[in-house]
Amino acid sequence: MSKRIGSVAVVIDDREEAAPRVNDILSKYSYLIIGRMGGPRRENNMGVISLLVKGSTDEIGAITGELGSLEEVTVKSALTSREVED
């Protein structure tokens, strides 16, 4: 199965409500995550997480799909076209 490197941006509109569910999903797919950086926006009850991921398009689609299914979360991803080895 071919793998790609990419980035996933996660914007959380209601940190208090959604953050625990987001973290559960990120833990479930931790094997895809190479790096993670996040910043809370406490004054707006928002959060932003940037993920560096490596996986198949199906695997990355699964994590972005689960995150995007949360009402308080917006997700955007970008993948390289170059295949990488495991």
Image: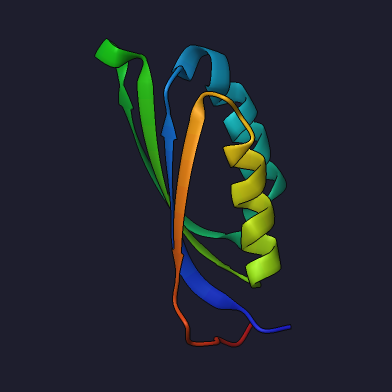
Please state, as top left, top right, bottom left or bottom right, where the N terminus lies in the image. Answer: bottom right
Residue 58 at x, y = what percent? 70, 66
Which residue is painted at 38% across and 28% down in the image?
Answer: 47
Residue 48 at x, y = what percent? 36, 35
In the foreground, 81 or 7 = 81
In the foreground, 9 or 86 = 9
**In the image, residue 21 above or below residue 11:** above
Residue 30 at x, y = what percent? 64, 52
| Quarter where residue 49 is shown | top left
**In the image, residue 36 above or below residue 43:** below
**In the image, residue 55 above or below residue 68:** below
Which residue is painted at 45% across and 17% down in the image?
Answer: 14
| Colouring of the image | rainbow
Q: How many marks?
A: 0
Residue positioned most to the left: 43
Residue 51 at x, y = what percent? 45, 53
In the foreground, 17 or 86 = 17
Left of 33 or right of it: where is 79?
left
In the foreground, 68 or 29 = 68
Please state, as top left, top right, bottom left or bottom right, where the C terminus lies in the image. Answer: bottom right
Which residue is painted at 42% across and 22% down in the image?
Answer: 13
**In the image, residue 85 above or below residue 62:** below
Left of 65 or right of it: where is 77?
left
Which residue is painted at 46% across and 67% down in the image?
Answer: 6
Left of 85 or right of it: where is 37?
left
